[in-house]
Image (cartoon, rainbow, N blue to C red):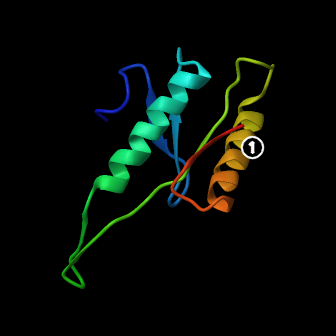
Amino acid sequence: RSNIREVDIVARYGGEEFIIILPEANREETKKIAERIRSKVEKCNFADEKNHLERKITISLGITSCFQENITPQGLVQKVDQALYLAKGKGRNRVEVI
């Protein structure tokens, strides 16, 4: 939560997927926020209590915008999903913008 603003909305979208809505942020600001979140997750150690180990995890983030075009909420989710799979396809642990 410390990496987003009060006006931003974070919600679980699927089993391992989250959506972050960043009103009032342009594409460049959004990419900076996403990269900051990605970097902080990468630096964290997570406890694997079953195996008594610490593990590192990474995240991939897809970004899109609704400023350039008239787009439905479903269309917006489809675009961001494309960006996410582009990030995963390029090796994961990255931010991609469509």
Q: Mark 1 falls on what kind of element? A: helix
Residue 69 in the image, given as x and y percentages of width and height = 80, 20
Residue at 68 percent of width and 55 percent of height: 85
- Vertical placement of residue 68 versus 72, above or below: above
Residue 61 in the image, given as x and y percentages of width and height = 55, 47
Residue 37 in the image, given as x and y percentages of width and height = 40, 41
- Vertical placement of residue 31 versus 79, above or below: above
Residue at 54 percent of width and 53 percent of height: 60
Residue 86 in the image, given as x and y percentages of width and height = 70, 53
> Which residue is under mark 1?
78
Residue at 33 percent of width and 46 percent of height: 40
Q: Can residue 21 be seen?
A: no
Q: Quadrant of the C terminus?
A: top right
Nearest the viewer among 48 and 92 is 92
Query: At label 1, which amino acid type do we have?
Result: Gln
Residue farthest to the right, as pictured = 70
Mark 1, Cα crowd under 10 Å, few <14 / some 14-19 / many 20+, is few
Instruction: Quadrant for residue 79, please give it.
Output: top right
